[in-house]
Amino acid sequence: MNANMSNTRWTIGSVLLGAVLVFGFYGIVINATESELFERDALYIEECGACHLAYPPGLLPVQSWRGIMLGLEDHFDESAEMDGETTEHIANYLERVALQKGKPSPMSQMLRNMPEVPPLRITEFPSFVKAHDEIPKQLQVETLAEGFLSPCADCHREAADGMFDKKLLHPGYGPKIWGND
Ligand code: HEC
Ligand code: HEC
């Protein structure tokens, strides 16, 4: 896998974050060296990227983000509780940049067939399930364990930048290749 590249990116990320902390400013960080597909927030990346990829906020609609932010004390069986000020800052950010009808983005396909009460997990959205339905077959398993597809960046090399195009999978990933060895 592309470990070097993601290390470099983490280093760049840490330097940026460091700079933000040094200036005592938890504002909006637009990472100018990457494609500017969405507004970034240093506090979100730090707090919500501590255990997993800081999911690009445009992957989920506001209802799902609210559900997540209101349930941090039992967040998928772990505690992700934060102080009130941090929680409020992140909740406001997510409300602002969430997936929205009529706001085109590379993640708009998540809206397809979305139920009225959307799930909390990205990996349970109908369009997500459909996009990944070949994967169990190619891995020759009946079903994937819950959470198997949650680390997007394992396969999508531009996941942190919100780009999930098939063409941007890590080399060697993808049902066509898995089926051919
Ligand atoms: C203490 C660790 C921890 C922190 C901090 C944390 N998470 Fe999580 N998160 C998890 C775990 C564990 C899962 C479930 C992963 C799995 O099933 O493999 C998860 C899953 C998720 C998912 C669902 C991914 C999917 O499967 O579609 C979302 C969305 C999410 N977290 C958002 C957040 C947000 C937003 C924050 C910050 C407010 C946050 N997380 C902070 C541990 C954490
Ligand atoms: C185990 C590898 C793997 C993981 C993990 C994974 N994906 Fe994928 N994803 C794929 C593959 C392979 C395809 C292309 C499927 C095909 O060719 O039909 C795909 C397709 C997609 C597509 C459709 C792309 C297109 O060009 O139409 C989206 C959107 C997507 N993934 C988002 C995500 C998100 C968001 C996550 C994390 C929550 C994720 N994926 C996790 C392997 C993965």
Image: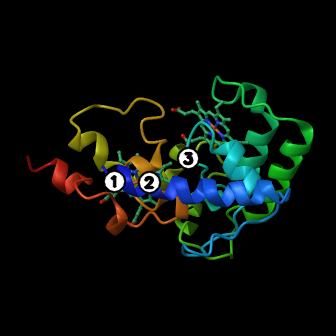
Task: Give neighbour class at mark 1: few <14, some 14-19, many 20+ (Cα, 10 Å).
Answer: few
Q: Disc 1 residue type? A: Asn
144 displayed left or right of 90: left
Tell which of 123 and 54 is nearer to you: 54
Q: Position of residue 157 (x, y in %)?
A: 40, 58
Residue that appears at 63% across and 39% down: 50
Residue 2, which numbered label? 1
Mark 2 lies on a secondary structure that is helix
> Most extreme residue toward the right, as rendered?
85
Q: Is residue 87 above or below residue 165?
A: above
Q: Position of residue 66 (x, y in %)?
A: 79, 46
- Dot 3 corresponds to which residue? 53
Tell which of 29 and 145 is nearer to you: 29
28 displayed left or right of 2: right
Residue 6, which numbered label? 2
Q: Is mark 3 within 8 Å of ligand 2?
A: yes
Task: Give neighbour class at mark 2: few <14, some 14-19, many 20+ (Cα, 10 Å).
Answer: some
Residue that appears at 69% across and 47% down: 46
- In this view of the protein, can residue 56 be seen by the observer? no
Q: Position of residue 35 (x, y in %)?
A: 55, 75
Q: Earlier in the sequence, mark 1 or mark 3?
A: 1
Q: In 3D space, how far apart are the residues under numbered discs 3 and 2 (Cα atoms)? A: 12 Å
- Determine which quarter of the picture holds residue 86: top right
Q: Disc 2 residue type? A: Ser
Q: Are marks 1 and 2 in contact (CB under 8 Å)?
A: yes
> Most extreme residue toward the left, as rendered?
181
Q: Are marks 3 and 2 in contact (CB under 8 Å)?
A: no
Q: Disc 3 residue type? A: Leu
